[in-house]
Image (cartoon, rainbow, N blue to C red):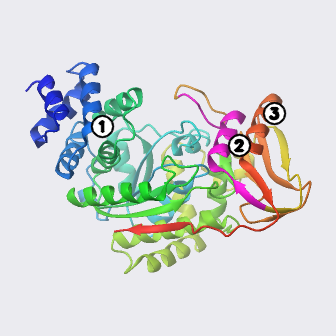
Amino acid sequence: MRMLDLILKKRSKGEHSPQELSFIAASAAAGSVPDYQIASWLMAAFLNGMTERETVALTRAMAASGRRLSLRGIGKKTVDKHSTGGVGDGISLALAPAVAACGVCVPMMSGRGLGHTGGTLDKLESIAGMKVRLDVPRIEAQLKSIGVCMFGQSEDLNPADRKLYALRDATATVESMPLIVASILSKKVAEDLDALVLDIKCGSGAFLSRQADAVELGRRLVKTAGGLGIRCVGLVTSMDQPLGRAVGNASEMRQAIDVLRGDASCGDYVELVRVLGGWMVHLAGKAKGWEEGARRIDRAISSGEALAALKAMIAGQGGDAAVIEDPKKLLPDSPHARDVVSPSDGYVVKLDARAIGGAAVALGAGRGRMEDAIEFGAGIRLEKKLGDPVRKGEAVARLFAEAPEKLDAGQAAFQRALAIGRRKVPAKPLIRKVIR
């Protein structure tokens, strides 16, 4: 089999066989064909599309390109959640231990932040000693012992995806729906999942701003997951303003701990934990429907079992578990702070999530390039959310940075995200659509 023939076939709008797609995935993982040929095939697939059969076959082939978790003998259903990413989206930090406390095995492969979106791994690493690069035997052992592990993609888990994603990023082919679906789901197949819940963000802070595009991606993901034998539900959720009240790594980790201690002041954050968790518990067979699953999440939080699961996970991955008892001391904000105040009386009518994500990057909480360093204590605390009343001179947000000059850039970016109006704008629903 020659890569040149496969490029020509896809350029001519042909449909690949599973064997051909296995060859492409294996070649990408092994580096046995030149990057320029893989890049040429990606562009042909981007321009001419892929059928549902091709998408399923490519996903399987990518997952088979490296090692896979083996969780069949664990005695619990394995369920994960995937988010397409947003600003303040630290949901996984509270969600994974809460679901595990309901008797579900939660292997959660996560990523790092880039651009205006935050990364779960960066938030976890704000805890001293926390390790997120784990080998497969250690991941399996932790899942068997405590039922939850949050980790990054290792060298031997789905290497085809790492190569294909890097080349997609370098060749302007990231937006291809079949390639997006294969990238997301191949990692989930490698986790040996029984079920998956998708959080597909829609709005200014999401990579898909239009709801129609988010729904289309959700439908493709759910259908392809079904073809792979994974029970799947997709939720299209709002990302026009940041989730919760924290934007930044240590602050989002601290917020997750507070939520698991019973703090319900971040209403949208708590709602999403309940709904996503409810679906995960339901798909694991631990509840008759997502509503009953959500009630089980409530009980896991109120009983302290969810917090205990988070503490056990942190300790299991080498982190300082004392952070659970004293998150303010062990997850501090950066030393320099400044309030952004309202210019007038009225209501908050805009908190543009993308612009606020850009403000967080300017403050040092995010990275513009993957190799950039981040400052764990930098970030934003939202004192007001969309629709909240505000008085002239009242703080809308508090900014934190390691250096005073970063506050200037962060404040300028935040002010572009903010608008105050005389009339309260109607709130959009957090859960826009459920796709089954």
Assess whether residue 79 is covered by the magenta stretch: no
Residue 158 picture location, percent across and down: 29, 38
Rendered residue at 71%/67% (across/down): 425
Residue 111 picture location, percent across and down: 47, 41
The label nearer to you, 3 versus 2, is: 3
The quarter of the image holding the N terminus is top left
Snapshot quadrant of residue 235: bottom left
Q: Nearer the viewer, residue 232 or 288?
A: 232
Within-10-Å neighbours for mark 2: few <14, some 14–19, many 20+: many
Describe the element under mark 3 as helix, strand or loop: helix
The stretch in magenta equals 348-369
The label nearer to you, 1 versus 3, is: 1
Rendered residue at 18%/34% (across/down): 10
Dot 1 corresponds to which residue? 46
Residue 408: mark: 3
Residue 115 picture location, percent across and down: 57, 36
Describe the element under mark 2 as helix, strand or loop: strand
- What whole-number distance in Å separates the C-alpha atoms at marks 2 and 1? 36 Å
Q: Nearer the viewer, residue 377 or 321?
A: 377
Residue 134 picture location, percent across and down: 41, 39
Q: Amino acid at mark 2?
A: Gly
Q: Is residue 327 above or below residue 127?
A: below
Is residue 316 found left or right of 176 in the rendered image? right
The quarter of the image holding the C terminus is bottom left
Assess whether residue 353 is covered by the magenta stretch: yes
Q: Nearer the viewer, residue 338 or 176?
A: 176
Dot 2 corresponds to which residue? 379
